[in-house]
Image (cartoon, grey):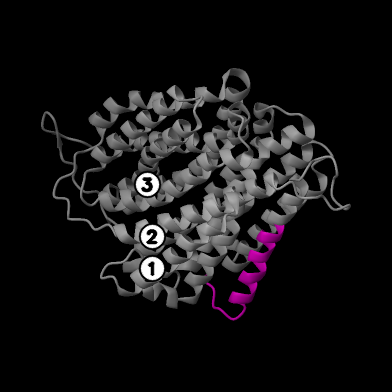
Amino acid sequence: MASRPQPAAPAGAGTALNPKHAVPIILFTFVFSLIIDNGFKFMTDSMGEALNLSLNEVSLQASLAGVIIGIGAVVYAALADVFSIRKLLLAGVILTLIGSLIGFLGQNVWPLVLTGRIIQTTGLAAAETLYVIYVTKHLSEQDQKTYLGFSTAAFQAATLFGALTSGLLATKVSWTAMFLVPLVLILAIPVILKTVPEEESLEAGHVDWIGLGLIAVLATTAILFMQAFNWLWLIPLAASVVLFSMHVKNAERPLVNPEFFRHRPYVTALILVFIVYSVQLGYLVLFPAMAKEVHGMSADGASYLLIPGYTAAIAVGVLSGRIAKFLPTRTAIFTALVSITVALLVLAFFMESGPWAFVVSSLLFASGFALLYAPLMATAIGAIPAAKSGIAIGFYNLTINVAVPLGIAYSAKLVDMGLGTPGFLPSGAGSYPVVMLILAAIALGGALLYAAMTARMKQPA
């Protein structure tokens, strides 16, 4: 991490660019990319209805995109050591535009829609990664604290605005219009060229392509298995797990250092995020489908129910530093896990009682995840030397981005299975109450496992 701003490279006419001048446009592309990605995830049900696909089938556009975001974050971070951030941002914008046009023009053909989403997401992953890299590379430590704080709140805000945008478009226009929204990024190109410095003297970077490839195979085959429960997918899944373990142990510069797995707090955090974060986007993808099934609400009506919850989550993200001063790490993690579990139980038992149940549930759910990230990250890297924390954080975030699409896949599959509803749950909401109960059990299982694994572990302050 840079301790002071690096001098900006000369631009065109020989004038040096102030690094801060580039922050607004990079932050805009970062937030806008999140809005697009989350918007598509929220409109999964509307897309499936238009294309005559089951929720399980159409969820691939969200789950595979999640894998690409995770892999792309690591790839773009490595490429930033080889190519300038300006070039990578422009490449991301171009990929986003190409994918969006393919999806829009092929809107009636599912394979083309899926291909468009995959190419689009490959581009969106650039801005989501490069904002953090630019801030830590070009701004002073004091400025970094300010601008990195924006990213936490931006993530929650983008989730909300993505849901609102897709809900309005799906209801008032057409779900296909969501593919046209990214065309706004054309306007960002001249601003990027004018304000983002063209870096010089970049070092030769390293990308563990083998490790990333094995992670991609692992995540994709796991998603495909959960989508169809075809046991043949377990063969490449098991093989990728074994090969990745061998690769990490024997490679000269692997994706993640094997010594990290000897740090119990780091392993504990990885296991917990893999379990608990798998319910995060599964919940969001099912949210509009549940609101429609139970209360006949349109996609835009369902998105309005998320406003209080994600507004509160933005506040929690902004105030996370102050919260940490009076709430110890372990206590904060348990508080977050309880909030997430209760949120799922509220929907499981009361979704038929009225829209208020959806509002209360989203309030507890979004705030819980906003509270969870920082203290859990502190647990993960507390015992890892500062010089190696970058790689550790990268793999930690990659784990989250693998868990999220897996959660989308198994949540959609559970709905499609048409599970019977026990007598103590609402009977007029299809299989959704029992699916919410299962997600609550998964979150609770993660909390109990965390309690067991940290019972004798020294926690960071």
> Mark 2 = which residue?
214
| Comes first in the chain, label 2 or label 3 | 3
| Depth order, front residue of 39/242 | 242
Residue at 42% over, 63% down? 240
In front: 185, or 410? 410
Check residue 448 for magenta coloring: yes
Residue 243, labelled with which disc? Answer: 1
Q: In the picture shown, does residue 260 fall above or below 315?
A: below
Residue 434 percent coordinates (x, y)? 76, 51
Q: Which mark is residue 335?
A: none
Q: Amino acid at mark 1?
A: Leu
Secondary structure under tag 3 reads: helix
- Compare marks 1 and 2 and give the one earlier in the sequence: 2
Crowd around label 3: few <14 · some 14–19 · many ≥20 (10 Å): many
Q: Which mark is residue 129?
A: 3
Q: Dot 1 lies on which element?
A: helix
* Label 1 Cα crowd, 10 Å radius (few <14 / some 14-19 / many 20+): some
Picture residue at 74% right of the left edge, 43% below the top: 360
Q: CA distance from mark 3 to mark 1?
A: 27 Å
Q: Is residue 335 left or right of residue 131?
A: right
> Which amino acid type corresponds to the residue marked 3 in the rendered image?
Thr
| Magenta region | 440-461
Q: Nearer the viewer, mark 3 or mark 1?
A: 1
Residue 241, by quadrant, is: bottom left
Mark 1 touching mark 2, by CB under 8 A?
yes
Along the polypeptide, which appears first: circle 3 or circle 1? 3
Q: Position of residue 383 (x, y in %)?
A: 43, 74
Q: Is residue 198 above or below residue 46?
A: below
Q: Residue furthest left?
A: 14
